Image (spheres, rainbow, N blue to C red):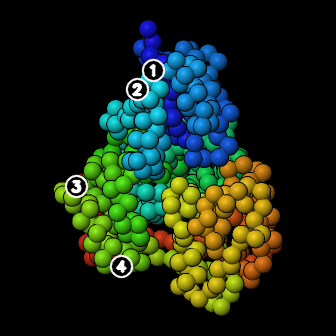
Amino acid sequence: MKKKIIIMGAAGRDFHDFNTLYRGDPAYEVVAFTAAQIPFIHDRIYPPELSGPPAPAGIPIYPEEMLAALIKSKNIDMVAFSYSDVTNEYIMERASLCASIGADFVLHSAENTFLDSAKPVISVCAVRTGCGKSGVTRFIARIAGEAGMKAVAIRHPMPYGDLKRQICQRFASLDDLKRADCSIEEREEYEPLVTAGTVVYAGVDYAKIIKQAEAEADLIIWDGGNNDLPFIRPTLELVIADPLRPGDELKYYHGLTNLRRAGCVIINKANSATAEAIDEVTQNIRSVNPMARIIKTASEVTVEADISGKKVLVIEDGPTLTHGGMSYGAGIAAAQKYGAYPVDVRGYAVGTIKETLDRFPRLTNLLPAMGYSAAQVADLERTINSTPCDAVLVATPVDLARIIDIKKPAIRVRYEVRDMERTGLEAFIMEFVASIA
């Protein structure tokens, strides 16, 4: 008899694990996906175009809160955990729940879910959300371009809309993002690369994505999401650590797995961290991966206008603040560096934005850029425009003023990865690029 399975996910690795491990295998029947972490992604169907003949009506996606009831009602044999940026304790609590009801609980290794590419692959992953993966990806793409190689980025999935439209997506212009109805969260990841001239692929079916990307790439950069493992077998495996959250590199299952696998660990934001924190992170890296090369980099924050003395509404990258666990980001760092005064937004937040701030009480003098739906984008716009301030400090990677109508001066905050060592990341990537040329 077939084993009945539920895949626990967040619209990303769950679909990839299904595609690589279960689709077409007669020994298994994936009965359902559950969804967590990202709002508005349940109550959908993994469509027949992706699920294949064994599931002609597709596979339903339920809220994770229904997991126990689904295990019982559908006689589930096994639950596969397939999303990231959660603690070791969090995962084992879910394992305990499944075991108490009689379902096995599995965590699939990267090796069992890797896809292979005919082109060299640099993977950029992390120990937590918000470590600075995107900046490193842009850094690598620039170095490769200067060496005469065309680097194409394949981004960890963010299929939060119509899954049939998102099977395989290619973004080479801002118009491509608009035509695809990308959410703010998708734009935050794709837009900085696209505007720098790097083509980005993403979607749901990564076997198809890799084939298309290989046709135009000399080098593929896997641009990871959260602290998840790569989907493509890396030629070079980079992992980013954050000294502003020392100790986290050992506490989060996927991040720790990345850390153990890494060929090179980049301690980013080292310009903002204490020597003690950098030393703690370094020792933790060495305790689990003594052979990894360690490189320190800076995350340099700049603003495009004078904000000294201004009262500013700081808008930060949403996932970094929510499941990333940070209480501030580049916007607060810029306000401190350039003498601005962040205002408290809580009395002015509306709708789903207010609900988000209520769930994360540590977020007081900033606003996470949540925009997973049109209604949430509208709530974000109303919140911004009702908050009294001199200017809006936009510290998201995307230009929000092109997406929503901000009725106050909107000032961009930019942050880029820079070397802190003479033979640092640039020299390391140049050496790798030369070896594959």
Residue 417: horizontal and vertical position, in percent? 43, 70
Q: CA distance from mark 3 to mark 2?
A: 30 Å
Residue 367: horizontal and vertical position, in percent? 66, 67
Residue 211: horizontal and vertical position, in percent? 46, 35
Q: Which residue is mark 4?
A: 274
Q: Earlier in the sequence, mark 4 or mark 3?
A: 4
Q: Which residue is mark 3?
A: 289
Q: Earlier in the sequence, mark 1 or mark 2?
A: 1
The residue drawn where x is 77% and y is 69% is 348
Q: Nearer the viewer, mark 3 or mark 1?
A: 1
Q: CA distance from mark 1 to mark 2?
A: 6 Å
Q: Residues within 10 Å of mark 4 (few under 14, many from 20)?
A: few
Residue closer to the observer: 173 or 385 = 385
**Residue 345, picture quadrant:** bottom right
- Disc 3, disc 1: CB below 8 Å? no
Q: Nearer the viewer, mark 4 or mark 2?
A: 2
